[in-house]
């Protein structure tokens, strides 16, 4: 999945995670009032370091690092930051690229932001790849991107940003 940040542990733009956070929809003060707001200290207490880097700084997990990428059981997927249901297994798309892919989000669950060429960090090869960032409408946390994948427009989400609740058998 292309990213405006970098894969966890692998720097694309030659910069550390935190200096890039200023441009993140989740971390910046974009003037939008989310239903759930937390202080940085509260977010740090709630999330692991990796989850914080993704949800609050717009990072991207290493491909295949989440067990959800190959777990296709039925169930629902909730925001790691506020537990709002964002996706359902009925909209999963089996794409073996290392993240969790969906055709749709729950209605009124995800908000979009622009990851345009101006945020390609001076790397022209990235400029055309990522255009739509997706974050939770309730807490603003970055979940992933909406991309053209194998000819389909898909929601390409970080498994670490989601809580999976399997359907009871
Ligand atoms: Zn949320």
Image (cartoon, rainbow, N blue to C red):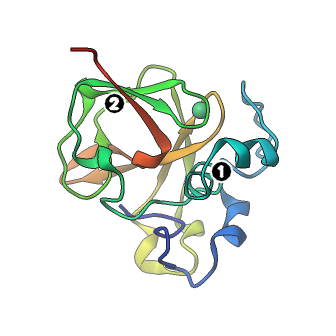
Q: Is residue 98 left or right of residue 127?
A: left
Q: Is residue 144 above or below residue 38?
A: below
- Is residue 25 visible in the rendered image? The answer is yes
Front-most of residues 169 and 55: 169
Task: State the SS at label 2.
Answer: loop
Q: Position of residue 77 (x, y in %)?
A: 40, 30
Q: Is mark 1 within 8 Å of ligand 1?
A: no
Q: Is residue 145 visible?
A: no
Which residue is at the front of the view, 156 or 164? 164
Marks 1 and 2, the one that precedes in the sequence: 1
Locate residue 22: give its quadrant: bottom right
Q: Nearer the viewer, mark 1 or mark 2?
A: 1
Q: Is residue 83 above or below residue 141?
A: above
Residue lying furthest bottom? 14
* Residue 93 falls in image quadrant: top left
Residue lying at 70% horizontally and 68% vertically, measured from the top left: 18
Q: Position of residue 27 (x, y in %)?
A: 71, 51
Location of the C terminus by quadrant is: top left
**What is the secondary structure assignment of the residue under circle 1?**
loop
- Residue picked out by circle 2: 104
The image shows residue 153, relative to residue 8, as above or below, that is above
Quarter of the rendering occupied by the N terminus: bottom left
Instruction: Farthest residue to the top: give it.
Output: 169
Residue in the picture at 81% in, 47% down: 41
The residue singled out by tag 1 in the image is 56
Residue at image point 63% right, 27% down: 138
Q: Position of residue 65 (x, y in %)?
A: 35, 59
């Amino acid at each position: 999945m292309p990213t405006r940040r970098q894969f966890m542990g692998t720097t694309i733009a030659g910069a550390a995670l935190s200096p890039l956070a200023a441009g993140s929809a989740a971390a910046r003060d974009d003037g939008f009032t989310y239903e759930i707001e937390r202080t940085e200290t509260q977010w740090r207490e709630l999330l692991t370091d990796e989850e914080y880097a993704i949800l609050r700084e717009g990072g991207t997990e290493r491909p295949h690092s989440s067990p959800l990428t190959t777990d296709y059981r039925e169930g629902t997927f909730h925001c790691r930051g506020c537990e709002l249901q964002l996706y359902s297994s009925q909209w999963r798309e089996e794409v073996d690229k290392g993240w969790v892919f969906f055709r749709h989000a729950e209605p009124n669950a995800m908000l979009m932001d622009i990851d345009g060429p101006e945020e390609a960090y001076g790397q022209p090869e990235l400029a055309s790849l990522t255009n739509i960032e997706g974050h939770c409408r309730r807490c603003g946390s970055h979940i992933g991107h909406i991309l053209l994948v194998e000819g389909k427009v898909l929601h390409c989400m970080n498994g670490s940003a989601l809580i999976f609740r399997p359907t009871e058998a």
